[in-house]
Image (cartoon, grey):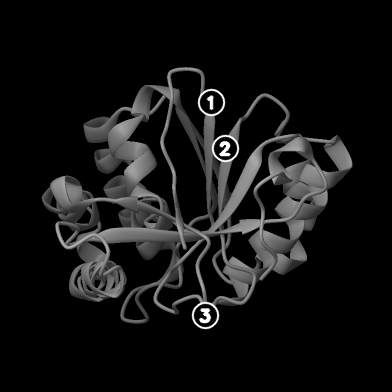
Amino acid sequence: MRKKIIFTEEDRIAIVAPHPDDECIFAAAALLLASGQTDVFVLTDGSHGNTNRSIEEEAAIRKKQFDAEMEYVKPHAVYWFGIEDTKLSENTGIVHSIDFTPYTRIFLPWIESLHPDHRAAAEMCMSEIRKQGCHAECYSGEVYKPFPSPSHYIDITSLAEEKRRLIRFHEDQAALEEVVLSLNAFRAAQMMHLPECKFAECYDQIKTGGSGDADNKRR
């Protein structure tokens, strides 16, 4: 049975987003439930997100939309790396500057995600987390493609409209809203033991070799 993630006042949370919008797609619960304890790391500029614009124009639009979302949600800190969209695998060294050791929970994209930047982000971050001996509980988040069998969840029924609001800041990616919320509704429908749950974010805990693995299950 999936385990429920409950944030505490002692938690310090990191979200690593390959693109400016991934943070609210797979980890909106952390942003909405514990924003003051959450740091957001955005690795690329999202500049290939709309082929009808130049990459320079698209990068500027994506940054402006992301900044508006962050101004609304007010996380503890935001780190923007600005690597060109789709080029993350050529810039694996950028995560060396991230100190993962203070965090108790880290949310990453899924290593089997459809997008190459998501896979690269997961690989480079997990390598760095292990190298640093970080003891955080690490979770993969779903972006479009669902996990075969998630290990953890957060009931976001009461947060669904706020999550929708966060996604709508990214007007340039208009198709996101229904896709993302439909996946959250699908996940909730699978949990028949929780009939009151209508929307859920699901995660898969990642084995890092640290103390946060006590309740881990392998993918």
Q: CA distance from mark 1 to mark 2?
A: 7 Å
Image coordinates of residue 76 in percent, x first then y, are 43, 23
User: Is disc 1 placed on a helix, strand or loop?
Assistant: loop
**Tag of residue 148:** 3
Residues at discs 2 and 3 in contact (Cβ within 8 Å)? no
Q: CA distance from mark 3 to mark 1?
A: 28 Å
First of labels 1, 2 by sequence position: 1
Image coordinates of residue 153 in percent, x first then y, are 40, 55
Q: Which residue is mark 2?
A: 105
Residue at x 74% of width, y 34% of height: 135
Residue 209 higher or lower than 13, as above or below: below
Image coordinates of residue 134 in percent, x first then y, are 77, 35
Q: CA distance from mark 2 to mark 3?
A: 22 Å
First of labels 2, 3 by sequence position: 2
Q: Is residue 93 left or right of residue 23?
A: right
Q: Is residue 73 left or right of residue 195?
A: right
